[in-house]
Amino acid sequence: MKILVPTVIPIDFETPDGVTRVDYDVTSPIPPEHRDAEAVVVWLNPGERLRAMPSELPELRWVQGLMAGTDSVQAAFAGTDVTIAAGTGLHDQPVAEHTLALILAAARRLDEAFAAQSERRWLEEHGGNQIRNRQGFTTLAGARVLIWGFGGIGVTLAGYLTALGAEVTGVARSAGERHGYRVITPDDLAAELGTTDVLVDILPGSAETDAAIGAEVFEALPAHAWFVNVGRGVTVDEEALEAALRSGSIAGAALDVFRTEPLPEDSSLWQGPNLLVTPHAAGGRPQQPGKLIAENLRRYRAGEQLLGVTT
């Protein structure tokens, strides 16, 4: 069999006997001599090139994505019988670290400090430091954090938050205990949101999660709560979020993802009060992708279930 591997990042794995590895340029059409590939690894493929793959690779049976969410890959291969696998575990640590950074920036209001720094202005008001004298969510010690989307990234983030003294609850399709953390379902949210200090969204994009977080959720959060999204922009009703920010029904938001990316220059979200923005930068650093590819290659050839297959 032949597997195509992108050249955008170094990817090392041992190619077993009977398998031919071909490195390809994600910005160019697949060369005719390699259109017999049975498997392809995708990462940073431009949208038009991804959408062209079904016609360029008629023998394709397996797409190995290196991204955590494969919604764009699924859209490109809709209507085909190609197996799509996500980059399970490759982004757990980088995304969890980025999310922790956003939460700490919110607690310490580093956005205000950086804005003042750019103006060479010392933050003082009424004789005291504005940041130091804040009330509400100012530390992770004792903070209640709700993580909606409690997979590998959420569990990794939970460990970081716990180490800093936070109380973490996960939200997933099934309730119970996972990795030592209490997990509730979305049906149980009403009883939790009112005492939540930080709501973290790590939901994947799907028809089921589209606008799952909207006015009802924001209205249920206390006024000092922050909302953080490192999942997918489509999971949030952005008009409801902006309304919540402008009305003060929540204290602020830190967003790494948006419905339209890049966020349009004329989007009113840019001027939203108490809003931290990063440009879909939480991931982008898959950790040891070769190990996952090698394991799924072994499984594929053995006829076993692949890791990270989406349904």
Image (cartoon, rainbow, N blue to C red):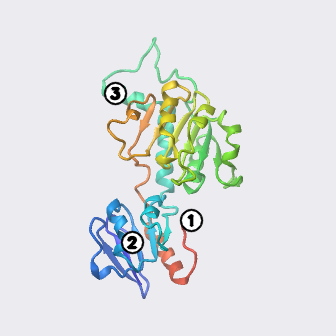
- Amino acid type indicated by mark 3: Gln
Q: CA distance from mark 2 to mark 1?
A: 19 Å
Q: Quadrant of the C terminus?
A: bottom right
Q: Depth-wise, is mark 2 or mark 3 nearer the camera? A: 2
Q: Is residue 182 left or right of residue 277?
A: right
- Amino acid type indicated by mark 1: Thr
Q: In this orientation, which residue lies closer to the viewer: 71 or 176?
A: 71
Reply above or below: 253 against 159: above
Residue in the picture at 65% in, 36% down: 193
Q: Which residue is mark 1?
A: 311
Reply above or below: 68 against 158: below
Q: In this orientation, which residue lies closer to the viewer: 26 or 165?
A: 26
Q: Which residue is mark 3?
A: 117
Give the x, y percent position of residue 275: 44, 33
Count of marks overlaid on the render:
3
Decide which of tag 2 and tag 3 comes sooner along the chain: 2
Q: Residues within 10 Å of mark 1 (few under 14, many from 20)?
A: few
Q: In this orientation, which residue lies closer to the viewer: 174 or 165?
A: 174
Q: CA distance from mark 2 to mark 3?
A: 50 Å
Residue in the picture at 71% in, 53% down: 177
Q: Which residue is mark 2?
A: 54
Give the x, y percent position of residue 60: 42, 77
